[in-house]
Image (cartoon, rainbow, N blue to C red):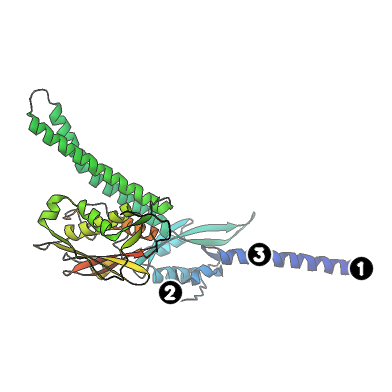
Amino acid sequence: MENSGVDNNFKNKIYYEKYKNQHAQLNAVLKSMSEGIILVDKNKQIVYQNEFFNNRLFNENGKVTLKTEEDLISFILQVSETTIENLDELFNSEEMHFKFNIKRGNRLKYFRLNKFSVRTETEFIGNGYLLRDITKEEEIDQLKTNLITIASHEFKTPITSIRGSVETLMRQDTNWDEDFKQELLKGIHEDILHLQDLLSVWFDIKKIETGTMSLNKGYFPVHHLISHTLDQIPLGILESNKIQYIENHDKSIPSILYGDKKRLQQVLLNLIMNGIVHNDSPEKMVLITISSDQEFVYIHVKDNGIGISEKHRKKIFDRFFRVDNTPQRKTGGTGLGLSICIGLMREHEGDILVESKPGEGSIFTMKLPIISKGEGDQYES
């Protein structure tokens, strides 16, 4: 009999250690989850909550202890910006899917709270709540919406123009003179080039985001970057606006740059054209200058345009962001130009710096690392 008691104690100890280890493992899993978990018993008392609810990304005030389901409701109302009036009724329903957002700085974080029943084979134990951060999903949905809206807006005008010109040329009841035909064909050609530019923008964004952007880097004189970029500006814009490059003769400024010259021209051209387009001054001016320090070359593009508020300066490099986003906005565009520019500069291990005040113009600065030319390296003359 004594041996039997010893055996039972030994077995109980083994079972205890086994379940203790399983409980520790389960607790470790729940603690390390990227989602929030709360378990509520039949009396609406909270019996478990993991560390997610103390995450400062979700809860700025740090540690919080929720004791009842009512505490959970109050907590959600406290930290979120929801205005749902029947939240109590929502929580009392058998199934619940509730989406809300929390403001963190200048950014909205989105969360979804799902309710589920916890049962054994024979009885109802209580309810569980799963809290997920769905910010990325919401932002992707918003990007898709913006893409559809902008694509339909930007593609509609050239496609309508092309269709009208083609239908005019196809008319059988009229003999158009040659000059008029050439004018329509020239317009069709320009619209097609515009559509190609739009497609190039989409492809560039995709390449930058997926890390598949291919750069043809090499050494080239800095004055080539400036002069070749100015050559790309339409003559009409050059004649009607003052675009000036003031050369810095400081010998400490490197005369040779390293990078993909065509892509850097793309960035510089975008900054120059932004200074012209977003400009209400009677005499639009863009001034290009160069400076450097021991590590970087700085190409400054200063304009006398409308300027950018501090609130908008933090967003201008975001995809699809436009300062004037109303249907009556004066300028078109996809809102992707600066996003591509910052992406291309970062591909060069550089950056774009911005100084601006509303009504006083802006200074956009291309920051490009200085990379010394080694022996045998070739560059453009």
Q: Nearer the viewer, residue 103 or 190?
A: 190
Residue 3 disc label? 1
The amino acid type found where label 2 is placed reads Glu
Q: Quadrant of residue 246?
A: bottom left
Residue at 12% in and 26% down: 171
Please indicate, yes or no, whether residue 346 appears anywhere in the rendered image: yes
Element type at marker 3? helix
Q: Are marks 3 and 2 in contact (CB under 8 Å)?
A: no
Q: Residues within 10 Å of mark 2 (few under 14, many from 20)?
A: few
The amino acid type found where label 1 is placed reads Asn
What is the distance, in whole Å, between disc 1 and disc 3 at their CAs?
A: 33 Å
Q: Earlier in the sequence, mark 1 or mark 2?
A: 1
What is the distance, in whole Å, between disc 1 and disc 2 at their CAs?
A: 59 Å
Q: Quadrant of residue 226?
A: bottom left
* Left or right side of 188 for 73: right
What is the distance, in whole Å, between disc 3 and disc 2 at their CAs?
A: 29 Å
Image location of residue 228, percent across then percent down: 24, 53
Q: Nearer the viewer, residue 51 or 144?
A: 144
